[in-house]
Image (cartoon, rainbow, N blue to C red):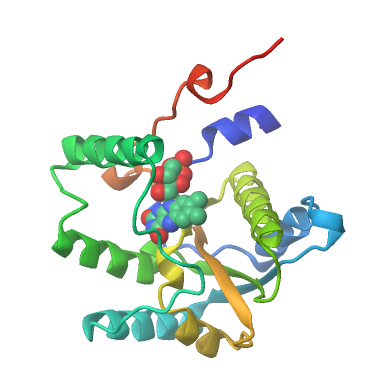
Amino acid sequence: MNTLECIKTRRSIRKFTTDSVPKKDLEELIEIARWSPSYKNSQPWQAVIVSGEKKKALSKTLITLLENDTEDNSDLANPTSWPDMEKGNIKNLLTKRMELTGVDLGAPEMIFKAKKANFNFYFAPHAIYLYQDASLSEWSLFDIGIFAQSLMLAAHAKGLATVPQAFATLYSKEVKECLGIPLSNRLILGLSVGYPDMESPVNAYRTERMDSTDICKWLE
Ligand SMILES: Cc1cc2nc3c(=O)[nH]c(=O)nc-3n(C[C@H](O)[C@H](O)[C@H](O)COP(=O)(O)O)c2cc1C
């Protein structure tokens, strides 16, 4: 698969097969992603790959916190409002998903279900958490975002699937405690990783994008 095709065909997968990914293939994702660019080549990224019993224990912890209605403690602030353009794109996504599945993803019971599915890592055999020192600037958030994209593209190129999950960081403190990440670090993103179950209807929907002409203007 060439780079352009890889960027265009990567998509978030929310149902995985139960097959584990060989360790050498997971290692290769990090090996590729570490070539991402960063501010002054500071490389402000750290990763933990969690599988097996440890991942089960983490899911259990997160689901218990959710069921006990524990207040979340993400290291990154959750957005409470959006500007009009982004709000329109989000509404478009929710409307399309509702048309296809008949499910209103904005309803409180659906948000609960969505969080639970995220905490189960959509039954993927592996989760990868990305984190960095909490004293770093916003540029380092930018850098670790590039790292995450490199990792997802590397996975896709190798026939693996991923989904980036802000929800997986809702209880950052407990995730860090469970995974041995120092509390002086900020948890940026969780990603489920595995092989895509393309039979599942949840993986049937391909998200849309704004037209290039709505994003970019040309000046001469
Ligand atoms: C920073 C970030 C956080 C996200 N958080 C979640 C999440 O918590 N749960 C989830 O299912 N998808 C999450 N997504 C996936 C987005 O919903 C998805 O990327 C978007 O709808 C575009 O779809 P695509 O990835 O299939 O192209 C997140 C994506 C990003 C980049």
Q: Position of residue 71 (x, y in %)?
A: 31, 81
List the single residue furthest toward the top: 220
- Left or right position of 92 against 101: right
Q: What residue is at 41 percent from the left and 64 percent from the top? A: 78
Asked whether 29 or 19 is in front, the reply is 29
Query: Against 103, is 123 above or below?
Result: below
- Left or right position of 132 against 65: right
* Quadrant that contains the C terminus: top right
The image quadrant of residue 61 is: bottom left
Asked whether 78 or 145 is in front, the reply is 78
- Left or right position of 178 against 79: right
Residue 16 shows up from this direction: no
Q: What residue is at 20 percent from the left and 53 percent from the top? A: 106
Q: What residue is at 35 percent from the left and 44 percent from the top? A: 203
- Left or right position of 130 against 167: right
Query: Against 220, is 89 above or below?
Result: below
Query: Against 11, is 114 above or below?
Result: below
